[in-house]
Image: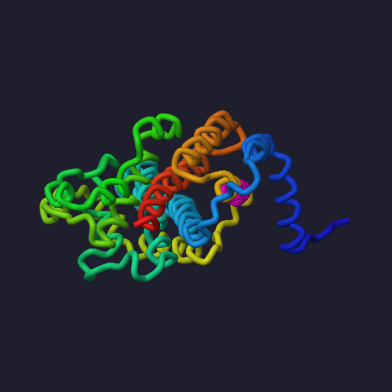
Amino acid sequence: MLISCSNGDTYEIQSFKVENTQVITDLKNVNSELLSTVPSGTRWTGKEKMQVVSADIGGAWGGGRIGGRAGGSIGMAFGNPITGAVFGAFLGGVIGGAYASWLAAPAEMVDIADNSQSIEGVCKILINDDMSINESAINRSALRAAESTTTNKLDVEEELIIESKLDENSLNIGKTHNIILSVMDGSVILQNEEQALLDSSNLKEALFNSEIFIDSCKAMGADASVGRLSTSDTILSKVMELFNQVLEEYALKTDDVAFIIGNYVDVIEESNELTTEQKQCIKSGLATALYSFKYWESTFEE
């Protein structure tokens, strides 16, 4: 006897399975423990800030996931789909998160002055082939002359970075996120742009020249900007839901965000229910949360 299931039934079954995984149980326990220590009345009330930060996180999560898949296909042409997938996921996380910010933020806070400094254009200049940040492209003289709030938007204190337990590649996604936003708000000026573009590898050029890759990452950012996560990955969606919940109800400042992330990273890294791709997508979102919170915390206080 054959029994057919509707799409709704299938989703409910998948959701039930996800709810009963060890990683979700452990993350729920993290949330319960953290939220049990929150005194009444200390919840972060900056609704507008939280909406933008949540959009940034969703864009990075979704962009990293779709970017990794598209990057793997593009990397296949160069005989290295794994490198393509890793680089694609990294770039996708940056582009998706930044695009979500641009759409979700109040119009007067971030804007793109001209087409040459599009989000993907700035990303191409800032990211080296090894996924490090091209520091020579940032005009440090202009940055030093700017108000101290500019530096506050870019940098997260070293002790908080350590507390977050995030790896360097994930942290670079967060750092680049804030630099791109600062370029868009006019507080950071780029330099040596032509040299940066000349130094690009064939894989990097192929990724940025792929309309499918760029548009897919932007689509993730667009969906995230209105609170929608376009993914059939139910476990990824659940992790994001739990993180956003504890972020909204527990975090008052960047220190709190770093503490939450450190607890989440412990669970994520130890899980054998998550794939390497899922773990990287989650950490891309966590790193973006850390830096995005810092940026918007400074911006809304100006």
In which quadrant is the N terminus drawn? bottom right
Residue 197, position as x, y percentages in the image: 16, 54
Residue 45, position as x, y percentages in the image: 55, 55
Query: Total label count?
Result: 0
In which quadrant is the C terminus drawn? bottom left
Q: Nearer the viewer, residue 292 or 81?
A: 292
Q: Is residue 121 left or right of residue 266?
A: left
Give the residue at x 34% y 65%.
Answer: 109
Residue 178 sits above or below residue 9 on the image:
above
Res. 24 image quadrant: top right
Q: Nearer the viewer, residue 270 or 265?
A: 265
Give the residue at x 45% y 55%.
Answer: 56
Give the residue at x 33% y 45%.
Answer: 175
Q: Nearer the viewer, residue 248 or 137?
A: 248
Res. 221 image quadrant: bottom left
- Identify the coloring: rainbow
The furthest residue to the right: 1
Determine if residue 95 is in view: no
Task: Give the dominant element type of the magenta stretch: helix, strand or loop.
Answer: helix
Q: Is residue 159 left or right of residue 184?
A: right
Give the residue at x 31% y 42%.
Answer: 155
Q: Nearer the viewer, residue 245 or 73?
A: 245
Q: Tell me, yes or no, whether the highlighted magenta stretch contains residue 242.
A: yes
Residue 54, position as x, y percentages in the image: 50, 55
Residue 142 sits above or below residue 261 on the image:
below
Q: Which residues are magenta?
A: 235-245
Determine if residue 183 is in view: yes
Res. 163 image quadrant: top left
Residue 251, position as x, y percentages in the image: 53, 45
Q: Is residue 13 left or right of residue 206?
A: right
Q: Tell me, yes or no, whether the highlighted magenta stretch contains residue 15.
A: no
